[in-house]
Image (tube, rainbow, N blue to C red):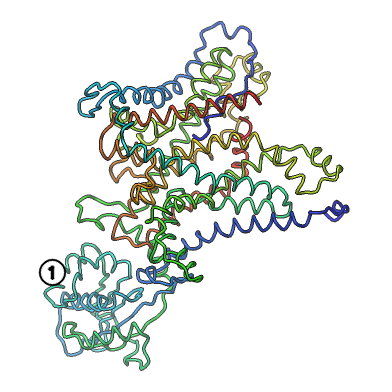
Amino acid sequence: MAGRGRIKEKGGLSVKIVSYSVAIFFILTSIVPLLWMISSSMKDNISIYKFPPTWVPEVPKSVSVTLNYDGTDLKKEDYELDAMEAIWFTWKRMQNEAVGAMKITGVKDGVVVYKASMPAYKFTVGRSEIVPTMIATHATMKNKLQKIRDRKLTTFDYKGDGGEYSGDTTIPEALPEQATNALKWLSESKVVKGKVLTIGEVKDWKRLFDNYIVLWEMTGGSESKTGSTTYGFPHFLINSVIVTGVTIILQLIIGGTAGYALAHLVKSKISGWLTLFFVATIMIPEIAILVPLYLTMDKLHLVNSLWGIILPHTAWGIVIFLFKGFFEQLPGELLQAGRIDGANELRIFYRIVVPMSAPIFTVVAVMTFIAVWNEFLWPLVVARTQDVWTFTVALNDFQQRASLGANVIMSSLVIATIPLMIIITSCQKLIEKGVSFTGLKG
Amino acid sequence: MKTAIDAQQQPRVKVRAQNGFRLKINWTGIAFLTPAVVCFLLFKYYPLIQAVYMSFFDYKVINPPGKFVWLDNYKYLYHSTEFWNAFKNTFAFFFIYFVLTFWVPIVQAVLLNEIKFASKTLRSLYLLPTAVPAVAGYLLWKWLYNPDYGLLNYLLHFIGLGPYGWLNDPATAKWSIVLPGVFATGMGMLIYYSALQGIPSENIEAAKIDGAGPWRRMRSIVFPSLKFIIGIQFISFICGVFLTFDPMYIMTGGGPANSTRTLSMLVFNSSFKEFRFGVAGSISFVMFIIIAIITYVQIKVSNRD
């Protein structure tokens, strides 16, 4: 650098300064929203709706309580009921505070009888059904017990004789806020039978990823009021992967063969007309044929199926155009040599042409991936039932569900970003090549 | 896909007549082309004709095609305030996208071209926001715009402004929908950047020798060499904006007070919400004609150059 820069230019420095600052400005301002997305995705249900917001999500705290049952005579069901009351009713009192998880240990005569625990996202899921009001009686919890079991909201692990209890037996004097509140309610309550032996609060960083777990746990029942089965976010992601994957395969086969035929197999006059036939469709906007395409799919009985989403993607003029342009540059001698050796055209195509054309196949695959993965309008129209939604349609639906907070939505966005992020960072070279094919060569 | 112009740029290479093999019936050629031809007929040309056909009917899905109404759907559009409002909105969006986003990748690419150190890293960083799927990006921005808990109002709060209901106010809704586009220009930047790599270095060297400083070179050599690609990008930009649907649908759903309802949204609503397929067909056809005219003008202009 020093050698080449011998002649000092006027304006050289200012160009450098402006160039770097513009680049850094745009990059930083576009990365800030991404960081905000990640930060929001790790916040709990309370702090996500706090103003002013914070950048670093707070590590959730889990409250653990040990209840002493000395001098009581309870059966397994009674213990379970008591544990559920201790967890749900206490949490209901603290629902506006950021509690990450609650753990209850039941002890009788120095022996562990049961352990029960519940993370925050399960409380969020079940809150509206299990504890809709502040009323805390045995009768209400008895009614809800079966529901808690069915939905696996709270884990209850009955030990009977689970070995000697070796934890603290005194309540610490200086308690953190959440634990103080929990203790206050538990000791005043006449519902919970166990007496508080000790109580504590620890930071639990694993609870930072609760919002991601929620996305997985949505399967089956979280929106059960509507009566239809619901699917977790992975289901929609898999749909998207299938749609994108099959589209790429079909495009490579259909576009590749057609492009090759146009370049080498048919007379130039026919080839010219056919190329026009294919490439002119770039002019037909998706929205202009949206309705008739939907009706066509309806006639083919492909509405509400993944094939309905995939098949229209087999007709992209740009793909045929790219393939034809690439195959035209292949040396004709090589193909002639193959013909003279007596290979038929099909054999020539897949033994000679395809191995030589890896660049165009990968470029088309990557460009298709980006376009189809992002697609929203067509899946929205043709996938009317949940089981065939792609993740883009699902995301749009999530934002309208009252039960999902912004934190869960942000975590779904983070997950949806990962596959595309992998493709874009690992295929940067191919994308640059593809961009210069489509944007420039023309 | 995006460019309607690519059609006219197909290389007019004459395929050499190859002896002998052409005389037989070209079964492989037919086999290779049939799937593509069928797909294009079925998923492009048939729907297009169907769209035009539908637009002359009071189309009924149950008992197609319903009553033949000749030009009534078009007359309806002509007298419909909804249609003209959407038309106006579409052009307003076109203007806003132009002001906010169109020039961004050009500036980014021209300036990045001056950077030698870490240019590959900068390019990857430019591409990074592109990794957020478009729908996810709009949802993210909707959250940033949130009047109560959003980051933008929080930042404004530092300088004593806000809170604003960015997407709830007809005055700002359009601009707020377009703004995310400023930060997702990675692909466009790459297109211009790769075009700049094609400038012969002799031209630059010659200008250097003639005493042109870097700013002057940028103005007289680098930027003019982009003219052609800017023209192409401009056409695909017009078509792209004209057909934009996702951000309006996701961020505002056409509101507030119909201020973000575009023609694309109108097609979607009149067909899949109101089930007036005939009207939707006529709007589609009007849009197709406009796109075709734009493309035609572009072909004429670029042929003249």
Residue A235 visible in the shown view? no
> Does A395 appear above or below B148?
above
Which corner quadrant holds the N terminus of chain A? bottom right
Residue at numbered disc 1: A143
The amino acid type of the residue labelled 1 equals: Asn
Residue B120 visible in the shown view? yes
Q: x, y (%) of residue A395?
A: 37, 51
Nearest the viewer among B122 and B37 is B122
Residue A26 picture quarter: bottom right
Nearest the viewer among B303 and A254 is B303
Which corner quadrant holds the C terminus of chain A? top right
Residue at (63% x, 31% y) in the render: A441
Q: x, y (%) of residue B36?
A: 46, 23
How many residues crowd around disc 1 within 10 Å: few (fewer than 14), some, or many (20 or more)? few
> Does B209 appear above or below A202?
above
Q: Give the left or right position of residue B63, taking residue A40 as reference.
A: left
Q: How many discs mark residues in the rendered view?
A: 1
Q: Give the left or right position of residue A125, taking residue B192 as reference.
A: left
SS at circle 1: helix
Q: x, y (%) of residue A253?
A: 49, 29
> Does A374 appear above or below A401?
above
Q: Chain of mark 1?
A: A
Residue at (18% x, 64% y) in the render: A147
Q: x, y (%) of residue B13?
A: 64, 19
Residue at (44% x, 60% y) in the render: B144
Q: Give the left or right position of residue A377, taking residue A436 as reference.
A: left
